[in-house]
Image: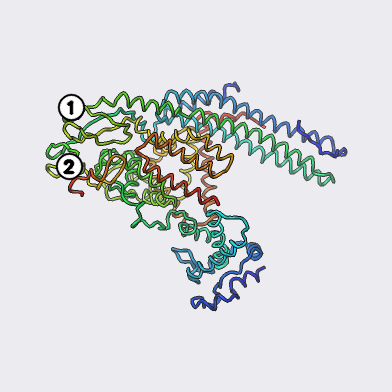
Amino acid sequence: MFGLFGKEKENSIPGEWTAQTRQMQERWSTFLQKLEERMEELCTAAIGELRTMREQAGGRFDMNLHQVHSGIIGQLTNMEKKLREVYEQQVNPYYNQLDKQLEEAGFRSDMAYEFREACSLRQEQFEKQRDQWKEQLERAMKPDNEAEYQAILQEYEEIKHKFDCSQCGAGIMLDKIYFTTTYLKCEACGTQNTFQPSTRAAGLPHLARTLAEERTAHLLKRYQETSLPEDYYIYLRKMFDEWNCIVPDMEESNEKFYQRLLNDFKRTIV
Amino acid sequence: MEEKKGLSFLEKLKAKAQSQEKYGGTPQQQDAGLSARTCPNCGAGRAKEDGLTHCAYCGFEFMSVKLTDGVNIKQDDNSQENK
Amino acid sequence: MFKKFLNNILGNDDKSKDDPEETMQNQPQGSSVNDDDFEDDDDEGDQPAHQYEFDSVTQHGTHYTKQAFDAAVEEEYQQLLANEKDALSEQDKSNIRREATRRIYDSWNGYNMDQFLKFEMANSLELTGYATSGFNQVQEEGNPLYEPIHGVSLYDYAALAHCMTQGIAEQDLLKAFGIEKAVWDEVNLLWPGRMKEDATFGIMTKYGEYFAIAGQHPKIVGLAPGIGAGGDNANLQKLKTDRYFYEELCGARTAAYEYGLDGAQWIVDNYGINLADFQAVAMDWMTAQNQNFSSADVLHYQNYQDEKREEYAKKFAAEQGGNVADDIEF
């Protein structure tokens, strides 16, 4: 129940004004409630759908998934726009008019301020729910990166002895996971063969960074809580160690990036 | 009727997304593969010690660039002509 | 208030007598700006910049030398530093130096925000450590960050990326640049790697500039885009010359994504413009905006784009049976 009155009672304010203000406030609350219910219906269904689409896509990039997600977010944006319009065209003018009325009649503006404050708080409730739905929608789209990595490792085990030299037919073993097209020398005849990785394996460098960040998210969170430089250094080093572990071939390039981030950070501390 | 609004919107949204052609087409999922490029001039294959950029037998230019130290490809993979 | 401002411009400190270069009448003589002066002067609002002339490259006023300016900034910076009680990080000091620069610039050139922003952008690498597109700030020659990777320069890389996005067959493209897929795969990891290494964003800035002129790269002559209606497309020409048309399509594309469409494909379907060409034109408009900076213009075009986005959003909504909350009334 929203408090319409301040600590001092203004008994002489016309009852009609109080009733109208309460009515306006309830209308606003009901309006937001209807939006919240529609938002819940839409997002609950969407989350289920996005999860299904994500599972069907596996590790593959699925544009449809992202389009559906964008479309849902677009609808939330549309609701926010509607809310803003109602506030600007109905609620705020009412507040201004009430404030003026009270002033002209020699009353304090408390009732007007409290009305506006109550409406604002109710709006914050809506926004909080909206943010929670957005987070859930985002999570529904998130692929299982660990599973994808395992699939890449598994694929490697399955194919590493599969290939023969195009020139002489001798077996060419894949000594590691290649994620770029690579020249592999045949030990028997010396011919340079061209190995093209699968689309899945080619995604490993990008997956590596995402995975490294996921695995060290708890360290980043700790730094965000403590703000201690030492905690940042621990997070950054561990994140890069994970990254390099997944794609050791990128270590040289990654370390330069690490240095840059470290220098950027050091500039911000005393 | 009102209860179905969100659901029917979602169905239409998904249908629309799936029916629309994707920019650049839908990427094909490819398996790993091994092949070897031979010289279109003389048919020779490339041997590791002769480098990747030129044919050791007839000098045909496979690649016109000078290779540097990359991920797996190294400077040493330049043929004599590039060194 | 105005008198104080005028005194600052005309100057009355001893610095002018020491420096033989500053002998012009009404030459700004350094700054005795303190907090009070600054607040008073700010009340004057924007001064018209046309009373001064500005160097088209550096955006410094032509009525003083850079040397004098830098010396004045250094003095102001030291004064501001002296006022700081807490220990400062490099970033803090950088911000204070930026503030010192702003005070001197405003004091010597009239208080015009657009002109100052133009000055900051033109000199951003020096002033802030970050490059801005369109001001030739990046020094590539002799800089190891710009060394070609497997013989593929940054310009080559941008042109390759541009062409890939235009749907040109990869085989034809690689052949045109004299490389094989193995080289391309590595280059496509290592150039982005260099961008991550570069704290000044110089490589990214140059990449954007090269992307904008990718169509002129000598190695792609004769390669026809596989997506869109081609370079002669009247819509593409219009996109390059008509800012309102460009902003309209930006708004439409955003609305398309908001309604679950592939916005880039929608542009191809309706205007025959592929994404690479669109983004190259976007770079050109952004660069032009930076070079002729006007905050009023920026706002004007942003508002126009928003209006168009609204219009197209309504259109897309209608095609899908309306928005999900259309029936909810206050």
Q: Position of residue C322 (x, y in %)?
A: 55, 30
Q: Residue drawn at (49%, 24%), measured in percent from left and top?
A: A51
Characterize the local packing of mark 1: few (<14), some (14-19) or many (20 or more) Cα atoms within 10 angstroms.
few
The amino acid type of the residue labelled 1 equals Gly
Q: Position of residue A173 (x, y in %)?
A: 25, 28
Q: Position of residue B18 (x, y in %)?
A: 43, 27
> Can residue C238 be seen?
no
Which quarter of the image is occupied by the N terminus of chain C?
A: bottom right
The amino acid type of the residue labelled 2 equals Asp
Q: Position of residue C57 (x, y in %)?
A: 44, 63
Query: Up-down: is C294 above or below C160?
Result: below
- Decide which of C68, A98 is in the foreground and name it: C68
Q: Is residue A118 left or right of residue A163?
A: right
Where residue A209 sits, quadrant-wise, is: top left
Q: Residue drawn at (79%, 36%), measured in percent from left and top?
A: A4
- Do discs 2 and 1 belong to a common subunit? no
Q: Residue drawn at (40%, 58%), measured in percent from left and top?
A: C136
Q: Is residue C14 left or right of residue C173?
A: right
Numbered mark located on residue A169 in the image: 1
> Can residue A150 be seen?
yes
Query: Up-down: is C5 above or below A214?
Result: below
Tell me the subunit letter for badge 1: A
The kind of secondary structure element at disc 1 is loop
Q: Residue drawn at (20%, 36%), measured in percent from left and top?
A: A192
- Decide which of C22, C216 is in the foreground and name it: C22
Q: Which residue is mark 2?
A: B50
Which quarter of the image is occupied by the C terminus of chain C?
A: top right
- Decide which of C98, A134 is in the foreground and name it: C98
Query: Up-down: is A34 above or below C57?
Result: above
Tell me the subunit letter for badge 2: B
Numbered circles on residues, count: 2
